[in-house]
Amino acid sequence: MKICCIGAGYVGGPTMAVIAFKAPDIQVTVVDMNAVRIAEWNSDTLPIYEPGLDEVVKQARGRNLFFSTDVKGAIAAADIIFVSVNTPTKTYGVGSGRAADLRFIESVARTIAEVATTPKIIVEKSTIPVKTAETIQNILAANTLGVTFQVLSNPEFLAEGTAVQDLFNPDRVLIGGERTPEGEQAVATLAGVYARWVPRERILTTNLWSSELSKLVANAFLAQRISSINAISALCEATGADVDEVANAIGKDSRIGPKFLKASVGFGGSCFQKDILNLSYLCESFGLPEVSAYWAGVVKMNDYQKQRFSAKIVRSLFNTVADKRIAVLGFAFKKDTDDTRESAAINVVRDLLAEQANVVVYDPKVTAEEINLDVLGKGHANPRLTVATSAVEASRGAHAIAIVTEWDEFKTLDYAKIFEGMHKPAFIFDGRNILDLAKLRAIGFRAFGIGK
Ligand code: NAD
Ligand code: UGA
């Protein structure tokens, strides 16, 4: 069996590496039009940072895992084609700022229709609006050789930072297909790939539309939990309740559960905001404005939380941060990844720069180029924004420290020593609630957390 995956990003790369690792008899080729990315997948420095990924790639690469820019060749040779291209929020035209931009999906479907000479199973791995399979089927019907295609939906539930672990041991694998004999056959073929390492009872099969919609709904429910606890964090700050204590108390109720209740500076990442906006837009398109507004509220709450954090810094530093040095620790949208897409850090740094602070950022995995690009945009510079090579360096001479990403190394810094080198009064704002505020206050810090 030959598998091809179009899109060598945060999903395509790790997902295919794990399939190849677990199924040595299947030849897996990952293709991308980005030649630099493919060269990196073929080098010792992979294009993405993900714990455990190097080992998996090293084991399988060159054996049955290949990375290539030959998109058409890989399509022609494959029995199963995973489509794992990006589906960002549209930035133009109808639905701008809300709808999913499906131009990359459409372009891939056209290429498959053009190149395929043998029957193929096309697997939607990207997150897409419900009914996208219909669009793909319509485009594939343009194939002039009368080749038959089965389109399946197989959304990916991995989280960055734990991708390898999530792929090795998924809560479930979801496969949606047409309820026809050919559709059922295609579903069974794909299920057979995952069954090499995933217990059968965790492989769920549904109709196409349930599978497509379940992905957006899963992300919406996860993000909703964060916005819910973050909304309560604001109330905690106003009342003297401690949000971690509240989260612990409600999470003990087995109907609520303890996970995804960590109050924070706001959720980031390439998917939650994009997918909820997409869900909200879909609801509106189907004539359901109330449902649309309900889900849009989750994103609105998140915007409020990000802005609330930087506003609190300014207010606490006597209503002005102008010319003050603020150390921002962490820039990635969560720990154990180098991904900065939609990271709350971008908003926090921009807000502080707008107040004319001198911002020094440190992140263990994100490069200075990426930080400048994300905050200022291509070709722009601002002397107030600098990047340090350690947390200690960033904090030296600072008036305040803001922790934005929960990297483990920030939990064990020598804060007493750091305090000595800072302007007094020295402030610390823990946007991830990873530090013991009482200990920091004993050192002399004016310490604040989220919801406490
Ligand atoms: P990404 O931007 O990291 O990777 C997408 C890749 O597709 C890019 O390298 C791009 O060059 C390539 N590409 C685009 N059009 C192409 C074409 N026509 N031919 C060849 N290559 C093409 O994106 P990602 O984070 O891997 O996400 C991909 C999809 O998976 C999205 O729909 C996303 O919502 C979904 N998803 C992402 C995650 C995550 O944690 N990042 C998790 C689950 C699902
Ligand atoms: C999320 C989902 O968890 C995955 O299941 C899904 O596949 C993926 O989106 C996707 O579709 O892309 P990801 O965005 O990689 O994964 O990372 P998460 O662990 O979900 O974290 C998202 C954001 O929420 C991060 O900024 C994180 O710090 C924040 N978060 C998470 C909190 O603020 N509090 C929490 O309790 C949990």
Image (spheres, rainbow, N blue to C red):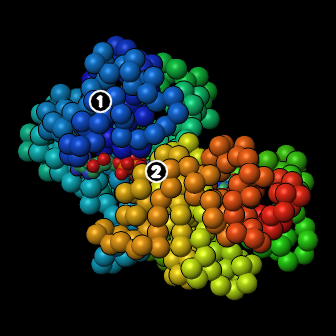
Residue 302 visible in the displayed image? no
Q: Is 325 above or below relative to 2?
A: below
Q: Is 354 above or below relative to 383?
A: below
- Residue 29 at what x, y percent from top left? 27, 29
Which element type, helix, strand or loop, lies under badge 2?
A: loop
- Residue 378 at what x, y percent from top left? 30, 68
Residue type at mark 1: give it: Ser
Task: Decide if residue 20 is on the left or right side of residue 110.
Answer: right
Location of the C terminus (image quadrant):
bottom right
Q: Which residue is mark 1?
A: 43
In the figure, residue 307 lies in which quadrant?
Answer: bottom right
Gap in Å between the C-alphas at discs 1 and 2?
Answer: 19 Å
- Mark number displayed over residue 330: none
Near-viewer residue (149 or 346): 346
Q: How many marks?
A: 2
Which element type, helix, strand or loop, lies under badge 1?
A: loop
Residue type at mark 2: give it: Val
Near-viewer residue (139 or 156): 156
Q: Which residue is mark 2?
A: 366
Near-viewer residue (231 or 212): 231
Residue at (77, 72) in percent of width and height: 425
Residue at (37, 64) in percent of width and height: 373
Task: Decide if residue 66 is on the left or right side of residue 71.
Answer: right
- Residue 293 at what x, y percent from top left? 59, 77
Near-viewer residue (171 or 341): 341
